[in-house]
Amino acid sequence: MQYTAVLFDLDGTLTRSEEGITRSALWAGEQLGYTGFRQEQLKAFIGPPLYVSFPEIMGIRDSDVDEAVRLYKERYARIGWLENEVYPGIPRLLRSLKKHGVKAFIATAKPQVFAERIAERFGLLPYLDGIVGPTTERVSVSKADFVRRAAGLAGGAAVMVGDRCYDIDAAKEVGLPSIGVSFGYGSREELLASGADSVASDVRELQRLILGDKEPARGLFISMEGMDGCGKTTQRMALVRHLERLGWEVTVTREPGGDGIAEQIRRIILDPANEAIFDETEAYLYAASRAQNVRAVILPALTDGRAVVCDRFVDSSIAYQGGGRGLGTERIRELNAMAVDGCMPDLTVYLEMAADKAIERRRSAGEADRLERQKDSFYERTAAGYEALYANEKRVLRVDASGSIEEVSGRMLEGLDRRLTALAAE
Ligand code: TYD
């Protein structure tokens, strides 16, 4: 079947929203003296209206229901909507739809303002052609109304995708085909019983049901750079966790290194016994490791639509070998051309730190390998190498690496979100 538009339910289909919903329900109940519930028991809040759930699930008295709903909404608006994450593989799916000219909409029973905020905050907005949900308080309109409106905007051959019987029922009422997803809050049985045309158990299967064997969109390549001691490894973990919350399936690699062969090359380079290595030899070894990493790890992951986070890439060679060792940035760039073969990062996160500060940090961190026992002037030339390289480089996100771990990751992730939105819009 060739669809020209997909209407997605939000909670349980694009995002795993239970945390914000169950915590808000738990909190609202507690404020009114209804205690002793575990978050786990409150999953049934996802889907039905709050006015039904509070009495049924938490035994809240009729006279308390209005207040419970008010408290719930208050907490949800403050923090609950942020306690959310995108299902793994959704960005790849949305990018692939865009690549093949298939429109994407959200049709939800959640207030439209929240759906919009979530879509924006979690990086979905640039891939969407519209969001339709209730715009007034205390709506009694059924889900079919939103699905009908979204279908009107979509035109052509639309399919509804959702995780509960309500989504499938709405599609039927409007006369649309539907695909159920069993990774959300409804079971395969529930979805089939309500008449879903098919059921996907993960996002990959969903993608196949919508796009057949059309090629997925290429993934996202992010490299991280900075002087030794800038805190790159710690920030890399924060970056990866953030990408995962946005639904990216992430492959992490590093240079020198990557697969088993590149890791063997890494050992030669970093071995303190190899004092006699020539600068040129070292430059070729970095490039050799990179040639292997690009072909064995990076390209396959990108072809598969994944996000690749590479700790150091060709810019390290340009700054360290070109600048630090004085081999010349252009020569190093040329030397790496065959290794990289045009596979350059979409985005480079540069953790900026002055050479003397980075040296100081490294000294206090203990044992040093061969490279870490370099003279200070080497690091100063390396830092200058980065500066020259990045003076005019649009792909680079510069992040001030001074301050606490949280301050740096806060700055980094904020910048990252802006860049991802810009990249998605391209
Ligand atoms: P590593 O222990 O991974 O350090 P870091 O955590 O700071 O990345 O060692 C990598 C070292 O290799 C680091 O000092 C930078 C250097 N290097 C180069 O000189 N050229 C290169 O092309 C690469 C990738 C790394």
Image (cartoon, rainbow, N blue to C red):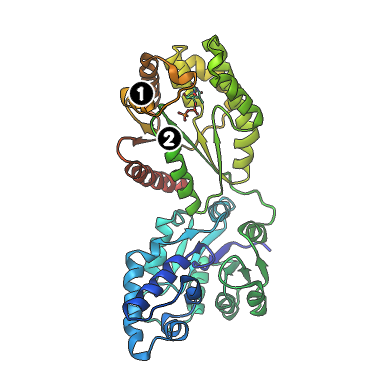
Residue type at the position of mark 2: Lys
Can the viewer see residue 257 in this picture?
Answer: yes
Quote the CA–CA distance across marks 1 and 2: 14 Å
Residue drawn at (52%, 32%) of the image: 344
Q: Which mark is residue 359?
A: 1
1 or 2: mark nearer the eye: 1
Give the structural element (helix, strand or loop) at label 2.
helix
In the image, residue 49 sits, relative to residue 197, either above or below, namely: below
Name the outermost residue toward the bottom. Answer: 62
Q: Is residue 181 left or right of residue 245?
A: right
Q: Quadrant of residue 176?
A: bottom right
In the image, residue 389 sits, relative to residue 412, either above or below, namely: above
Give how far across and how far down residue 331 sits, in percent: 50, 14
In the image, residue 245 sits, relative to residue 165, either above or below, namely: above
Give how far across and how far down residue 296 sits, in percent: 65, 34
Q: Is mark 2 within 8 Å of ligand 1?
A: yes
Give the structural element (helix, strand or loop) at label 1.
helix
Can the viewer see residue 395 in this picture?
Answer: no
Give how far across and how far down residue 367 sits, in percent: 45, 25
